[in-house]
Amino acid sequence: MSTSPTGVAGITEDDIAGYLANTPAFFERYAPLLSTVQLVSPHGARAVSLQERQIELLRDRIRGMERKFMELIRAGQDNEALSGRLHRWTCTMLLAREAPAIETALIDGLKNEFLVPQVALRVWGLAPEHQGLVLSQAVSDDAKALATSLTMPYCGLNSGFEAASWFEPGVPVQSMALLPLRVGKTAAQCFGLLALGSPDALRYQSDMGVELLEQIGDIASAALARLLP
């Protein structure tokens, strides 16, 4: 006849564990037993008492909570820093009154505040007096259709998009983000496209969060809408 791991037929370790969990008075009746039980410490090949093992478990749990707390603090600091950059960039564009100044504030602000190596911008349907701006250069119907089809920023590898040709020469672009520009988030048509590029193939990935990019697109749209007729 086979025996259970406890060495007693018909009684398993689960049975013993269940009994002890449901009968706390057992340890009151056999209190000296707690000091005689010896366990192996996970922090070294040495025997420790049950009480010492419990203390080690509590310390490990506290250290884990401290690590999570520090991660939350760092995440909060990162979010605060991003919020500050977004605020400064927005204020700079709001202070720009002339069209060339708006264009410069938008592009240079993204490069300086968010360390974006390449930024390009195209806007169509501009008021006639703004046709001489760099952002007013010709855009194909295919690129306009792509912008209109985007319901959220595109992030991924540079797959030969027309927008990649808008970047300054000399800095290779491996990954891109394409932000559609609309007058209001519910507008069907786009009036422009904001392109961000990086030589780092992992900077803009298809599975990354796009909340910040959406905010950048919304703010850029609001600033540039002043240039429309």
Image (cartoon, grey):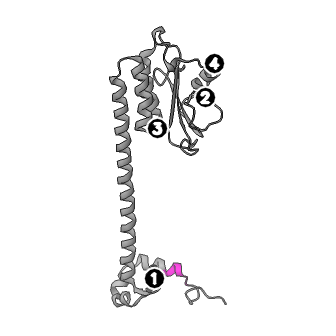
Instruction: Name the element at disc 1.
Output: loop
Q: Quadrant of the N terminus?
A: bottom right
- Image depth: mark 4 or mark 3 in front: 4
Residue bearing the label numbered 4: 141
Residue lying farthest top?
128
C-alpha separation, residue under disc 4 versus residue under disc 1:
69 Å
- Local crowd at mark 4 within 10 Å, few (<14), some, or many (≥20)? few
C-alpha separation, residue under disc 4 versus residue under disc 2:
15 Å
Please give the range of residues in magenta. 11-16
* Between 214 and 34, the one nearer to me in the picture: 214
The answer to which of marks 4 and 1 sits earlier in the sequence is 1
- Local crowd at mark 3 within 10 Å, few (<14), some, or many (≥20)? few
Q: Residue at x 40, y 65 (%)?
A: 64
Q: Is residue 89 left or right of residue 154?
A: left
The answer to which of marks 1 and 2 sits earlier in the sequence is 1
Residue bearing the label numbered 3: 211
Q: Is residue 14 magenta?
A: yes
The answer to which of marks 4 and 2 sits earlier in the sequence is 4
* Between 18 and 114, the one nearer to me in the picture: 114
Instruction: Give coordinates of residue 37: x percent, y percent.
Output: 41, 88
Mark 4 touching mark 2, by CB under 8 A? Answer: no
User: Identity of the amino acid at label 4?
Assistant: Asp
Mark 3 touching mark 1, by CB under 8 A? Answer: no
The answer to which of marks 3 and 2 sits earlier in the sequence is 2
- Image depth: mark 4 or mark 1 in front: 4
Residue bearing the label numbered 2: 165
C-alpha separation, residue under disc 4 versus residue under disc 3:
28 Å
User: Identity of the amino acid at label 3?
Assistant: Glu
Residue bearing the label numbered 1: 44
